[in-house]
Amino acid sequence: MSAPTAYRARSETEVDDGVDWFRLCALGGLAVMTATWVAVLYDLTITLGGSVPLLLLVTGSIALAAVLSRLISERVAAVLTVGLLVVSYGSYILSTPNGLELLLQAWDKIIADSISLLTGLTVLRLKEAHLWVLGFAPAPAFFSWYLAFRRRYVLSAVVGGLAFLVLVLTGDAATAFSGGWIQRGMLFGATLGGIAMIGFGELERHGGSVLQADVLVVLFTLMLIGSAIQLPFTGSALRLVEGGPTTVEGSLTSSPGETTIQGSIELSPEVRFTVTADDPQYWRVGVYDRFTGGSWLRTGQAGPYSGQLDPPPGDTETVSQLVRMHDRANVMPAANQPVRVEGQVREYTQVTSHGGLQSTVTFQPNDTYRVVSEVPDADEATLQNAGTDYPTAVQQVYLAGDKQPDFSSGFESRTQEIVDTAGAENPYETAVAIEDWLEENREYSLDVDRPNGNVAESFLFEMEQGYCVYYATTMAMMLRSQDIPARYVVGYTPGQQVGENQWVVRGLNSHAWVEVYFPDVGWVKFDPTPGGARSDAEVTSIEDARQSGDGQVDVGGSEDEPLTTTTAIPTNRPTSNATDRNRTFRDPDLPGVGSDDPGGSFNGTASTPGATVGEPESDRPDGFSEEQQRYAAFALVAMVGLAAGAHRAGATRAVRRAAKLRWQGTKREPDTDVERAVERLELMLERRYGPREPNESPSQYVERLSMSGVDTRADRVVELHEKAVYGPGVSREEADEAIELVDTMVRSNTPLLRRFAD
């Protein structure tokens, strides 16, 4: 018995015994593919909440697919799937602020946001991300399994692959499974699942014939290529400061929408910008509201600056700032809360959903911009009596359950113990108690090992030391466990004072702190990071850089001014020197970093009018970058995969038939051309009336169709065919006549070509 026959016989025996192993293996491949993208969504729900509803939705969708696969057609199932997507996405939009208005009038914004999502905007940055996750899962789960139950394995693999691809494009697949080998493993798993489903599905359809081995060979090759490359889309590539994440500055400002908590870090003493301002302030760069356990994200997207921004609800102090860049950067440092941007820079300015500023162009050395801020100005008594009547919008953004991962009961109880020990009786006193406890019970150090799991819990229970991001993260989450709106903020401390109203800000001034919301006051800064050891580290870094001759450390006479003192920022905290609000003290700011090659020199003054902005650099490195190579490899794999899938789904056959129908080809012998014309005629008639019977000649076929109103010109074509095949043959003129008649009928039956028909 030959190998194919034996293989087929064994398959039939297994089916007779009630077990179709090929089908089970094909469905197992789909289960693996489904598990890859569901695992990414499940990882998101660990932060957002809703893990159990997600699993129930996926399971229910698969069960529904099993039932409906026997009851409804594929067209109805496709319509149902589209309906699921429309309802889920529509519900998500309606749940957002002004959702109904967006749905009815702002389709351009919806499309723009969708494009942003598919080009690296992580799902976690969506305001109602948990609803998006729960709305996304049912449609691909239902339709991929429906198709598999109908034995449409290729289309099922396409649907499941698209679901995984969406999460790759958003960057969530790479974020959920960080680490190169894990990413490749996930891609390998998704590819392997698709291969198993298509390969075993084809074996099932063809009785296990080895003629289908080519399918497995092609798919296995794709699997090897796919697993050899990393996931090419890992989120937005936009950088705010030209410095790597190995510095404090780089880790805080290297991404506009996300900042990841790092381990050991360095300081950069190089000057980034100078500020001429009425008072020293913390120069805010980014605000983040969603904590994932290991990083912070800013939900929502930035929009264009369109004029005056809303000030805080309470009393404020107006602070005007003129910022002059000394290095390339996309950040727009400004005091809280910016209300107005002046000068040319306005057309390049965007406003985040949290009221911060960011630039759409890269600032060049000596570029300037001016910002006016309204800084909350409330005394201690006002903050103590502010109460807890938080606006609904503040509660939804900063206290919703999806804004932080689940904490252990121990985290909440330890926080409560600290608050009770301090005797705190209101949100302000609670914030002060937590701030004091962190300052007094944790040591400042840049040399730390990043913990696994939740950073806030690790810093509260296990770690003895850390730097600003650990202090600020832990304080923000401790406050939220007390139902107090708090957010994580990054930027720069005031810097070194070099004149009455002028400060030099270096990379080491980059910092992370906390802002706490108080009703009728606004967002108030709290900084739990201890200042003594931090300032010592900064001073040492600057002095070492000066001794080594680093020309980027000083600007505008900063080398002649003290490093250890700066004018104090007005505070809401009672101090032993409360009567002297302008006392001097050691720089209360954190380390920062960044390591780029700044150029240019500072020569501006406070009288510089307006603002100037540099355009993005046009220079690009020669050759292809590693990222571009990964994109190219991914595109190649995608094209090969699509081609193979199209072939197995019959798309290539359909294209060949369409080409054959519409193009006669080069002229040959007259008899051969007539036979080719009749083949085209049959293809056209088959589409409209059905195929020719096996034992039916072309003339009998046309005669049978004459009762259905077939074009009478077909009679002449088959007449010439009879003469060519069974008679003396046809002349060149007769062959051309047959070709022209078929061409005319094809044009008449093709809507776009009908206008050219006779």
Image (cartoon, grey):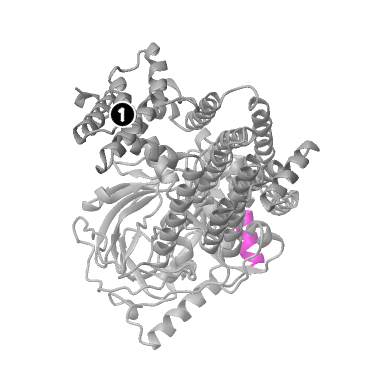
Q: Can residue 683 be seen?
A: yes
Q: Nearer the viewer, residue 478 or 622?
A: 622
x and y percent of residue 448 in the render? 61, 71
- Label 1 SS: helix
Q: Most extreme residue toward the right, as rendered?
A: 17
Count the numbered circles shown: 1
Check the image and report above or below for 55 versus 81.
below
Instruction: Judge whether 560 appears above or below 738 on screen.
Output: below
- The residue pinned by badge 1 equals 723
Extreme residue toward the front, this view: 728
Q: Is residue 439 magenta?
A: yes
Relative to 246, residue 385 above or below: above
Could you tell me which residue is drawn at 49 percent across and 71 percent down?
246
- Name the image quarter holding residue 720: top left
The residue positioned farthest toward the top in the image shown: 707
The residue located at (59%, 53%) in the rendering is: 213
Category of crowding for the residue at label 1, using alpha-carbon neighbours closer than 10 angstroms: few (below 14), some (14–19), many (at least 20): some
Please provide percent x and percent y for residue 224. 56, 61
Tell me where residue 507 sits by quadrant. bottom left
Residue found at x 42% / y 54%: 256
Residue 424 falls left or right of residue 675 = right
Which segment did they paint magenta? 429-442
Q: Quadrant of the C terminus?
A: top left
- Characterize the magenta stretch by its predominant secondary structure: helix
Residue type, label 1: Lys
- In percent of width and height, residue 16 lies at 78, 36
Residue 43 visible in the shown view: no
- Residue 401: say if magenta: no
Where residue 99 appears, as percent x and y from the top left, is 44, 29
